[in-house]
Amino acid sequence: MSPPLVVQKFGGSSVADADRIKRVARRIARERTAGNDLVVVVSAMGDTTDELLGLAAAITSEPDPRELDVLLATGEHQSATLLSMALHGLGVSAISLTGAQAGIITDGRYGRARIAGIEPRRVQAELRTGKVVIVAGFQGQSARASDDTEITTLGRGGSDTTAVALAASLGAARCQVFTDVKGIYTADPRLVAKARQLPVIGYEEMLELAHQGAQVMQVRAVELGWVNGIVIEVLSSFEDAPGTLIREDPLVEQRNKVRGLAHDRNVAKVTIVAVPDRPGVARSIFDPLAEAGINVDMIVQNVGHGGETDLSFTVPRVELALAKKTLEPIVRELDARDLTTDASVAKVSIVGAGLHNAPGYAARMFGTLADAGVNIEMISTSEVRITCMIAEADLETALRALHDAFELERPEPLDLGSDAAAVG
Amino acid sequence: MSPPLVVQKFGGSSVADADRIKRVARRIARERTAGNDLVVVVSAMGDTTDELLGLAAAITSEPDPRELDVLLATGEHQSATLLSMALHGLGVSAISLTGAQAGIITDGRYGRARIAGIEPRRVQAELRTGKVVIVAGFQGQSARASDDTEITTLGRGGSDTTAVALAASLGAARCQVFTDVKGIYTADPRLVAKARQLPVIGYEEMLELAHQGAQVMQVRAVELGWVNGIVIEVLSSFEDAPGTLIREDPLVEQRNKVRGLAHDRNVAKVTIVAVPDRPGVARSIFDPLAEAGINVDMIVQNVGHGGETDLSFTVPRVELALAKKTLEPIVRELDARDLTTDASVAKVSIVGAGLHNAPGYAARMFGTLADAGVNIEMISTSEVRITCMIAEADLETALRALHDAFELERPEPLDLGSDAAAVG
């Protein structure tokens, strides 16, 4: 029987320079000595991706998406080969594979490809020869005819997705995501001193945290883990300490229902004032935004008076200029009174499975913010989340007040260590 | 009928930064406007290859050759995509292809692969759609099974070989190699002020110049051009001026037979003193050097006295330390008296088709050096070349004296411009 297979993923900060790459190699060598088969997914070194984007920007303001993908994919080729060399230097047999060589097949959409499938034959063959297999993350090749393949990248954080997809395809026992934080926290520890690392979090809760601004894991990777039942461990590449397990959480009803807080500053509020209140207006506003690729999130429409209504919604702050440019002709066409924007807002969310069925949590959130003097501008909810938009200046106050109100510093009531070991 | 196809190659200094890449793009756009189909081969930007080698050296003193090839190949991927983006910015339809995508098949030897064949289907298909095809030079993929391909590089200057091989495979009308010099000179113009650019040079002469240290063109590329009858033009990427044509030269007998001077400082002299003069000694010395991958060039064995002889030969100066390490046990085993080395030597060569059949040239070379006070330490000859090893300190004196003695500053007697046009 072949030994248990572990998939490990190391982010850009973990392989930022030669010394860090050698440290990662030593960690991998230890894991190998423990007797596990290993597939290791790496991101590009440090700021390489941003540097390559800068080079492209120096050439042209609108780089061709296909060419950009080939350019960016070189970052992970480089880190993968260097990590393989470092392992050889430690006497560990290893081989680096490009995304294409590792059989990562994508749907061919440049810059934001999705993994359409994995052909694990080569990875399995290299594992059988006793090698640690290093895979360049963030990339794959399109499923076009085998002699006309194209290199495609998976978007920011895509290496997480590479790792989880490989873990699913290879039937790995564990998928470990090494990063520059120790795990998933009840809130951002840089803003909330009492923030506590969670030993375990459910997929759905993690998805909401990721969607609402927690940047530790790519949303797509969590989705893929959920669909395939892959237990993902998020942990620090700089310390030897247990991380956070992302997994199906059967104990969810026995817990404090709020598991963590998320926040997002990359948000701006757009209000169209005095829109004529008639059918089809919403579509005439949101269709062009969707066509422009702008992600609209919270939407609030006030009750109309006298045939007019105010329509507010949020967009990513980095897309505000594009949103204004897209909306200005529409506002004129609709004969609305005005278009106002506010970029000094932020979103704060409480996340926990089952929140939806326990209305007391919403009341406690709104009451806590009111007591802290924080004004709520917009509200949205999902099955496992309640989000309030507030002034960005109030963000830290709001996070600390909510962390206290929901007693997030209190450890979980259950011993999850042994449970986690049983699953892992 | 499809328009004439031109293959152009741009070296690392021609694409060293964003501005130079944009300049190259404008040159390509002009050529495209002239109505030619274009395949463009690029090297890595500026010092990228050396920087990547430095990264690998920071990881391990003996990088795995396979991993090193994947690492180095990223340099050309980057420059190829950036050049393609720059062309798009000028409104020129273009696509970059990796060596593998361009169908460059190699023999799979890492770091010094030879091109085993070209499958030009994809390049031809992209040309038919009206695109300028940018090919990452210096690399190909091994001919192993299509799902286990390996990236291999062709060694220093390998992009020249990529360009000439593509020109041969695609039946190109011209192969232009753009570089940071204006063409091939009668001697290095940095050392000999009177050096003159040659309008045309034969393949065999160019091969000898390249072998003997002229670094403008890779030897392998010239050989490939010769075998396939590809006319190669070497010209400056920074000026609009005619370069030097490398081609079959039917006028060779009508010329001044010495076409140019070459020199090489990357040379060291090794002498094994008082070797027992018996059969098999040479093999016991040169076999281990060959196994260590050391290129032995000039070999001189003095007439033996009393059963002993001195054996001298040259090795590349960068390989001298390895040569000493390899030879020391052998010298002891052979019971030779001593092993001496001299790294302060240089080679100077006169090159010209037909030199072999005109002994007067050797006499004039030796006499000129003697008159200039330059001592000759070793001599070797080929069909088209006579090489003398001298002290490195005498190199410039020797080059200037020989340039004068063979009247190399005098223009060729024939109008080669119209002839070149007819061939090109």
Image (cartoon, coloured by chain):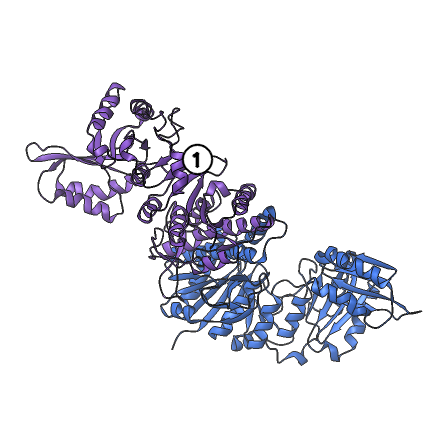
Chain colours: A purple, B blue
Subunit bearing disc 1 = A
- The answer, for residue B176, to whether it is visible in the render is no
Q: Quadrant of residue B128?
A: bottom left
Q: Which residue is mark 1?
A: A181
Identify the amino acid type marked 1. Val
Labels in figure, total? 1
Residue appearing at x 67%, y 57% in the figure: B190
* Secondary-structure class at tag 1: loop
Q: Is residue A137 left or right of residue A377?
A: right
**Where in the figure is residue B115, as x and y percent of width and height?**
54, 69
In depth, the one of A144 and A209 nearer the eye is A209
In depth, the one of B72 and B423 nearer the eye is B72
Q: Give above or below for B178 relative to A354.
A: below
**Where in the figure is residue B79, as x and y percent of width and height?**
48, 56
Q: Quadrant of residue B233?
A: bottom right
- The answer, for residue B68, to whether it is visible in the render is yes
In depth, the one of B408 and A226 nearer the eye is A226
**Where in the figure is residue A253, as x and y percent of width and height?**
26, 33
Residue appearing at x 26%, y 43% in the figure: A295
Q: Quadrant of residue A216?
A: top left
Q: Is residue B264 left or right of residue A174?
A: right
**Where in the figure is residue A160, as x and y percent of width and height?**
40, 46
Q: Please rate how many residues cluster around mark 1, counting C-alpha atoms within 10 Å: few if below 14, some from 14 to 19, many from 20.
A: some
Q: Quadrant of the N terminus of chain B?
A: bottom left
Residue at the extreme right of the image, as rendered: B306
